[in-house]
Amino acid sequence: MNSIWEDIKAQIKDEIPKNSFSLWINPISFLEKNDSTVLLSCPNKFSKDWLTENFSPLIKRKFQDRTSSRLDILFSVNQRREPRHPSTVSPTIEQMVLPNMAAKPKPFTMGFNQNYTFDRFIVGRSNEFAFSASNALANDFACSYQALLMLANTGLGKTHLSHAVGHAVLNQNPRSRVFYTTAEDFTNEMILALRNNRIEDFKNKYRKRCDVLLLEEVHFLSGKKKTQDELGYTLDALANDNKKIIFTSSLPPKDIPNMSKQLTSRLTSGLVTTIDDPDYETRTKILTKKASEYGLKLSGQIIHFLATRLKKDIRQMESALTCLKAKSDLLRIKIDMDLAREVATCLVSEEKTIQMNDIKDLVCKYYKIEPDTLHSKSRKKEHGYPRNIFVYLCRHHTPQTLEAIAKTVNRTHSTVLYAAELVEHKMKSDPKLRRQVQFLSQKVEEMRH
């Protein structure tokens, strides 16, 4: 069975991104098989939860294809216990505390945002790798890198992940020395140290008394040669001591004006990830969770409408929910579609609304079928396949309700919902389908301009 698992790993390696395989699948090892259950070993609890939620169906299907039997897949955390050393002090005798000394040293503390933790981060296709990489680095999970650079525009979650790393490191070891700063604050701190003849203290703080450095907004270093030089020496010192370093930036270092080649090289010497604009599914998750946190009961129709219109960033979605709650509470009115449209209009400029007929024409032209085929009763694959994609595109690119989409294809509400979810699910494992949907989605968005 162990050889079967190694063969399955080799198959999965060809089907998922290289980085995802290295982080999640490669560290798994086969433990045992009991009756109809396969037990696999993974490095830690976070890995166990992530694998169960995201890769368990894929692994289960691979085992079923290979063994021709249905097997349940379970993951077990491989706990490594440190050897116990006999105590030299009798447990019945209390150790004396020296005068004027605390019994226990105070743990290092840092004022991180308490809401910015890994379990509160909404994961989607646009940020999955950045989330996985930062979580793996924070938890010492199968990392071949000690530095991570996250690239993202404002409001997409890179600060959330930076704080989450800090929380995770301190939860594991409260005595860890975690320094969080922005590039602007780092520069100002260095200038102040120079003015007060304390530059050696400044250097020692970041080079010798730091276990984890979280440095945000490195694009601010543009044109600041002395700060770039000092930061470069600091990064070299931290790298030599195998310290963890996390950077964030709105621009790739090579595109930052007046950034030295030496610092650019250092910033990109580790793992580089990007966080893109959230897709429809991720926006839906964000709106649903934050609405619950705000105490708002929003219908699926309103969530769908907001997820369709609010595409900029997370702050825009938070602003919309804040406005909805304020207007509802102050005016004592119910949150309905009219109020949602009013709030959305204040936050986003009007753009051309995509009509379902536009998407129908696009899909029919691409798959070379007649428009009547989409709402026919035919269940043939050559008809059902483009119909499902049409439903998916309408769901993600128009403000139409499920009922309206269902009426267009002559199907029920539940059938249309299943069709959209089916395409969403198959895109994860079918590269051909994923490329087709991405191409068609791009063409649909081009219609807005």
Image: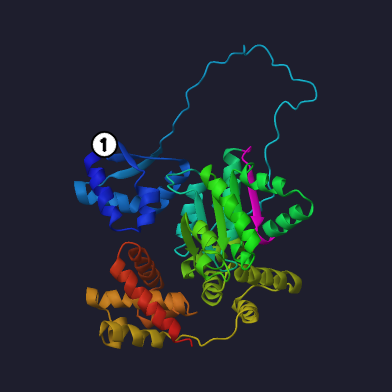
Q: Nearer the viewer, residue 190 or 444?
A: 190
What percent of the width, then of the height, locates residue 39? Answer: 33, 39
In the figure, 366 relative to 381: above or below?
below
Q: Is residue 105 left or right of residue 259?
A: right
Q: Is residue 402 left or right of residue 244?
A: left
Q: Nearer the viewer, residue 223 or 447?
A: 223
Residue 406 appears in the picture as rendered = no
Q: Nearer the viewer, residue 50 or 174?
A: 174
In the figure, 344 relative to 63: above or below?
below
Residue with the mark numbered 1: 35
Q: Is residue 425 left or right of residue 110?
A: left
223 part of magenta stretch? no
Split into 4 quadrants, where in the image is the N terminus? Answer: top left
What percent of the width, then of the height, locates residue 308? Answer: 51, 75
Q: Amino acid at mark 1?
A: Asp
Magenta highlight range: 174-184
Say what secondary structure mark 1 lies in.
loop
What percent of the width, then of the height, locates residue 140? Answer: 48, 43
The residue at the point 44 percent across, 49 percent down is: 50
User: Tag count in the figure?
Assistant: 1
Residue 430 appears in the picture as rendered = yes
177 part of magenta stretch? yes
The residue at the point 21 percent across, 51 percent down is: 65
The residue at the point 52 percent across, 69 percent down is: 300
Quarter-of-image position of residue 416 = bottom left
The residue at the point 66 percent across, 48 percent down is: 203
Quarter-of-image position of residue 31 = top left
